[in-house]
Amino acid sequence: MFIEPYHPNKTPHGWIEVICGSMFSGKTEELIRRVNRALIARQKVAIFKPALDVRYDEVKVVSHNKTEIHSNPVQTAKEILLVGRDCDVIGIDEAQFFDEGLIEVCETLARRGKRVILSGLDMDFEGKPFGVMAPLMAIAEFVTKVHAICVRCGGMASFSYRLSASRERLLLGEQDAYEPRCRSCFLKGKSVAEGEGRRDS
């Protein structure tokens, strides 16, 4: 269970929190929950997402359960420094889609006394570390890994299985493009797909 750290106003210090997991594991939901708690505490908050993520809304951060909150779509990580400099808490959704500059941006914000909360996929559709997520998890003070439920066996799902034959790493998708799977069902699906040249269904 994640326990939100104490942040006394008299001695401000910054840190980085990473929320990671597979598709449909509740990463964005948890990000929104933490940000809303900061808003209740009357802290200044800014939320960012990559401009390419327009699945549910061009501006808002929206979870698969349709929970939503206003955000600032940005093209590059450096833009976050400009908008977020006057805030206490910085939320960043879909961190895996950002450029490598996000690592230095997060460290800069933390050095300035900001609380930085990121959510993103820790692995891509092949089960490999996704983008900047691994180094972000390494430098973070707090890492929370959330899990979905495997749609095949009902077990704990940590992998995002792609249902289409596309090999593009950056492929935005919803329930028709991905499904959460446990390790066993994920590997079984990959084996069938590689052996028959298609995705299993």
Image (spheres, helix red, strand yellow):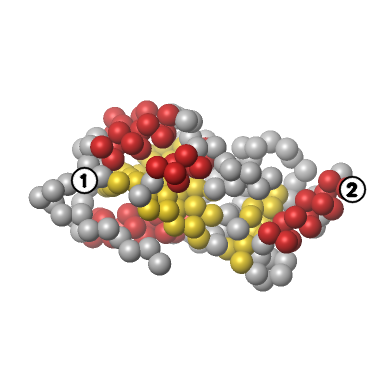
Please report the residue visible at 75 percent of the width from the left and 55 percent of the height from the top. 187
Relative image position of residue 42 (x, y in whole percent): 19, 55
Q: In the rendered image, is residue 134 in sight?
A: yes
Please report the residue visible at 33 percent of the width from the left and 36 percent of the height from the top. 107
Q: In the rendered image, is residue 62 in sight?
A: no
Q: Quadrant of the N terminus?
A: bottom left
Please report the residue visible at 89 percent of the width from the left and 48 percent of the height from the top. 196
Labels 2 and 1: the sequence-earlier one? 1
Q: Secondary structure at mark 2?
A: helix
**Residue 158 placement, left or right of 38:** right
Query: Dot 1 surroundings within 10 Å: few (below 14), some, or many (20 or more)?
Result: some
Q: Residue furthest left?
A: 10
Indicate the quadrant where residue 159 lies.
Answer: bottom right
Q: Which mark is residue 170?
A: none
Relative image position of residue 100 (x, y in whole percent): 47, 30
Q: CA distance from mark 2 to mark 1?
A: 54 Å
Relative image position of residue 174 (x, y in whole percent): 62, 52
Indicate the quadrant where residue 103 lies.
Answer: top left
Q: Which mark is residue 13?
A: 1
> Can you tell which of label 2 and label 1 is closer to the viewer?
1
Q: Residue furthest right?
A: 196
Q: Residue at label 2?
A: 196
Q: Secondary structure at mark 1?
A: loop
**Residue 93 placement, left or right of 149:** left
The amino acid at mark 1 is His
**Residue 55 placement, left or right of 108:** right
Q: Quadrant of the C terminus?
A: bottom right
**Mark 2 touches mark 1? (CB < 8 Å):** no
Indicate the quadrant where residue 171 lies.
Answer: top right
The amino acid at mark 2 is Glu
